[in-house]
Image (cartoon, grey):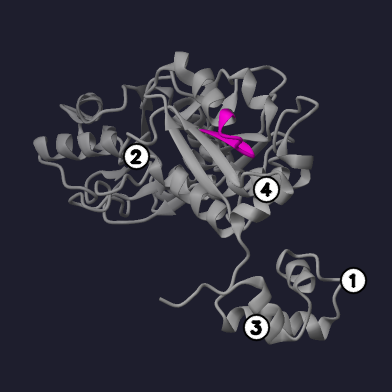
Amino acid sequence: MNRKATALDVAKLAGVSRSAVSLVLNGRGDGNVALESQQRIREAAAALNYSPNKIALSLRNQRSRIIGIVSDQVVTSPFDGNIIAGADAVARSHGFVTVVMDTELDESRDESAVETLLDRQVDGLMYVTVGLRPLHVPPNMARVPSILANCFDDRPEAGLPSVIPDEVRGGREAAEHVMSLGHRDIAFLAGDSLTPAAPRRIDGYRDAFKVAGMPVNEDRVIQVGWDIDAGFHGAMKLLDGVEPLARPTAILCANDRLAIGVVLACYRLGLNVPEDVSVMGYDDEFRVAKAMVPALSTMALPLREMGEAAMTALLAEVEAVPNGKNDDGGTGASAGGGSATGAEPASSSETMVPCRLVVRDSTGPVPAGR
C-alpha cells in the first residue's frame, strides 16, 4: 500500500521549506511566502493528493472543528431532516463535522443534550425544530457561538439569532398565485394557532387581498387542524350543499395534508380539481405533494436553505470568536446579512428565508361565470 504523502514530501517536490508548506496550506501564506512559491506548493500538494491533518490543525488552533446540533424531533421525523442535511453540507465544506442529538420532543432533555455536546468540546451549537415554534433556549447554549433554525428565542430580548421561513410572504404568494388565475372567492383552511406558522400564513393571505384592494371574507378563513381528515371536513363545510355560484373557487391550505383532504372532499361531492375548485397546499411534503392526483400546487418550505443559512452564520461567528468560546457569555451567532440561499435579515437577530412557489396540476383558471 502506498504511503500517504506528508508535508515534507510536498516541501521537497515544491523546493521549499516545510514551514512554508504549513503556512500556505493553512491559509497564512500571503505576506509570508512568495506568490510563486505558494503556487508551486499548491501544485505539489495537488499532485501528491495531500491535505493538512485536520486533527493536528484543530489542536494547534484549540478547536475541535465539531458543531453540535440539538433537535426536538428532526432526526426521527420524516419531514424536516433536510434542515440538518443543509447544515451538515455547509459544515463539511468548511472542514467541520456535525454531531446530532435528538430529544424526541422531551424539553426536559434539552439542557442535558447541550451539556453532552459541550463536554465533547464543540465549537458551536445549533438547535433545530420540526415546525416553526418559540423555543425556551437552554441557558448553557450561551457558552459557545449558537444559533436557532426553524425556531426562535422565546425571550423578549431575543437572545439567540434565528433562521426561520418567511411564512407571511409564503401565505401572500400562495394567494397571489390563485388570484393571478382569476380567482377572487378564495377560502383558507388553516391549522390550529398553537404553532406560529398558521397565523402568519393567514396574515399573508390577508395581505394579498389588501394589496389587490379587495376585502377579506372572514367566513372563508377557517382553522380546522393539520391532518387529512381536518381538510376533508373543512372542505365539506365550505362545499357540501352550497350552490355553485356561492362556493369558493379556490381553497388554500396551511399544509399539504389539509389539501389532500380537500381534494378527497371534492371527489366525494363530484367536483373536479382544478376545473371546479382549485386547491393549493403548503410545505411541498416529500413523496406526497408531487405524487398526489392531481399533483399539488404548493409553497415549498425552504428546509435545506434554512440549514445552510444557519450554519453559514454560525461558522462565521465560530471563526470570529477566539478559541471558539464565548468567554463573555455572549448570545451567539449573528444571523444578519443576506446569503446565497436568498435569506433576508428581518431584524438583527432573525433571518427570514423565502418559501418557493411550486405550480402543479391542482390549481387552474377560475371556472367560467365566476
Residue 258 versus residue 61 in the image, above or below: above
x and y, in percent, of residue 237 in the image? 23, 23
Residue highlighted by disc 2: 79
Residue 126 shown in magenta: yes
Closest to the camera, between mark 3 and mark 1, is 3
Give the residue type that dot 3 points to: Ala
Please report the bounds of the magenta region as a residue range: 119-127
The answer to which quarter of the image holds residue 253 is top left
In the image, is 23 to the left or to the right of 194?
right
Assess disc 1: are there few (<14), some (14-19) or many (≥20) residues with their C-alpha within 10 Å of its C-alpha. few
- Separation of residues labelled 1 and 2 (CA atoms): 49 Å
Residue 120 versus residue 45 in the image, above or below: above
Q: Secondary structure at mark 4?
A: helix
Q: Which mark is residue 59?
A: 4
Give the residue type that dot 1 points to: Gly
x and y, in percent, of residue 200 in the image? 51, 30
Give the residue type that dot 2 points to: Phe
Q: Residue at x 56, y 51 (%)?
A: 91
Residue highlighted by disc 3: 44
Q: Give the mark nearest the N terminus, 3 or 4.
A: 3
